[in-house]
Amino acid sequence: MTATTESLMLPQTFKFTSAEHGAFIDGTETAAGVSTIDTLDPATGRVITTIAETDNETVDRAVESAARAFEGEWGTMLPARREELLHRFADLIEENAAELAQYDALEGGKPISHVESVDLPLAVEQFRYYAGWPTKIQGATVPVSTSDTHVYTRRIPLGVVAAITPWNFPLCQAAIKLAPALAAGNTVVLKPSELTSLSSLRLAHLAIEAGLPAGTVNVVTGTGAGTGQALVSHPKVAKISFTGSEATGRHLGAEAGRSLKHISLELGGKNPHIIFADADIAKAAAYAATTAYFYSGQVCFSGSRLMVERAVLDDVLSAVEEHADALVLGHGLDRSSTMGPLSSATHREKVERYLNTVSGTGATVAFGGSRAKESGYFLEPTAIVGPADTDPVVAEEIFGPVLVIQPFDSIEELVPRANSGQYGLTAGVWTRDARKAHTVARQLQAGTVWVNTYADYNAAAPFGGFKNSGFGKDCGPAGLDKFLDTQTVWMSLA
Ligand code: NAD
């Protein structure tokens, strides 16, 4: 099924047609350089619009604008007023939800019903949650063992934050960075992925409409190697807040080391999703399929490595296949779609290269594995049964609709195998035995463990990985902490 031509048009309220659009600095859109990038609709391969590759000089203007706002109106604003403005920002995201959802559905290819029911509420929740914080950021008095001395700490913002986001959750990821960074009193230059810039640009307009001072939120569009690199290496950037691939994370870690900037890294995952034989198998299998194929598996916490107690392997596999069969592949703006395309032709080829490694390993492709539809970058929901822990399809993040399924026979065997991967983002455990659930959960090397559920997410609950999945939590007080520093003041009373 495909969407109608009318519904594929960009919302009229905010149309991008030229490189004049592409950087939002000091409260207005601005010309951003000479070269441009075509943004493609991944469901058709057609050009949606053109964005600017923001050049170094314009990136510099964006950072200078953020630095001025930090020294000026935003940095000195009373906390209660900052709270008010962040709530107003959240109101405007809600009021413009229908338009914002279309950008992510169109550019990202994700079903619009998912954007509306998942991404939008999560983005609003970030602003609501962190809007409550500015009046509660406190230092402490310190009981030092020195006579006649008063020591206290102040929690202070870092300055200009470079927020770099991936293409898979453009609006959400922008909110996850903007809300705590702003609540802490920082200003931001946001660089969205070159594949999905529109919702971030629209957010910058809404920030101004909400009353945030010009320069508090700036956006620069463009590639990572060009615009992104110019941003993260700018001397006035105090902090890099990055979400994306492990490879880019390592590169930015080195960049932060060179210039001694604060950095937090939210990277990839290959997440063990474990089903014991005593679990509610129907429910567990439904979650297994949903979390593996949601957004075509292009989710960092996708339950992409399903580990099933051998006795129930066949039951789980057939239930997962039934769920996969029921998925409706289609255009992001088509309301009947429940699974969209992969993000680009290059990305689909990368996923297919993983599928090609399966033959000759002893594993089997249980279903799927082929391209779906004639246009766009669709791939069928796929399952691979029986790969070894060291096979690339198990050891690496595929980031596609490819579920690997592995049997296990005991907890003793399961835990070291589940921990054998390089990543440590999330894990899931399904069992009716509470003791078993807690025993396994505490042994798993994963930043988040879900028991008898999967993929729950809330602005109040810290989220972030161990090992190669990065460091620095999103959400909760920890999500705010990473945008703050501590100043200690010693005062002699002698
Ligand atoms: P990516 O690393 O290719 O790009 C992410 C962002 O970094 C983009 O905006 C890109 O332009 C920018 N970038 C690239 N090189 C740069 C450089 N040298 N300097 C500055 N910026 C640069 O990742 P992607 O393909 O967009 O996203 C998918 C990855 O993101 C997956 O690995 C996924 O697991 C991960 N991810 C993690 C989380 C999490 O919370 N842990 C959430 C979403 C996505």
Image (cartoon, rainbow, N blue to C red):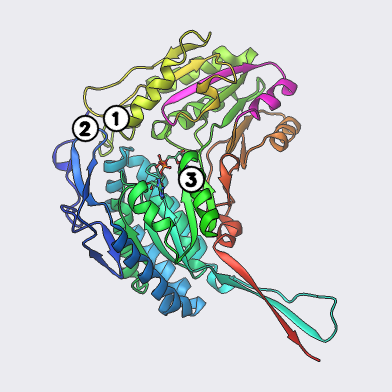
Q: Earlier in the sequence, mark 3 or mark 2?
A: 2
Q: Secondary structure at mark 2?
A: loop
Evaluate whether residue 95 shows in this view.
Answer: no
| Residue at image location 21% in from the left, 49% down from the top | 36
Q: Which residues are magenta?
A: 399-421
- Callout 1: few (<14), some (14-19), or many (20+) C-alpha neighbours within 10 Å? some
Q: Earlier in the sequence, mark 1 or mark 2?
A: 2
Spatial CA distance of label 1 from label 3 is: 24 Å
- The residue to which callout 1 is attached is 345
Residue 251 is labelled as 3
Inspect the image, locate mark 2, and give the three-letter code of the amino acid beneath it.
Answer: Thr
Would you identify the image quadrant in which residue 412 lies? Answer: top right
Position of residue 121 in the picture relative to residue 456 (left or right): left
Q: Secondary structure at mark 1?
A: helix
Inspect the image, locate mark 1, and give the three-letter code of the amino acid beneath it.
Answer: Ala
Q: Earlier in the sequence, mark 1 or mark 3?
A: 3
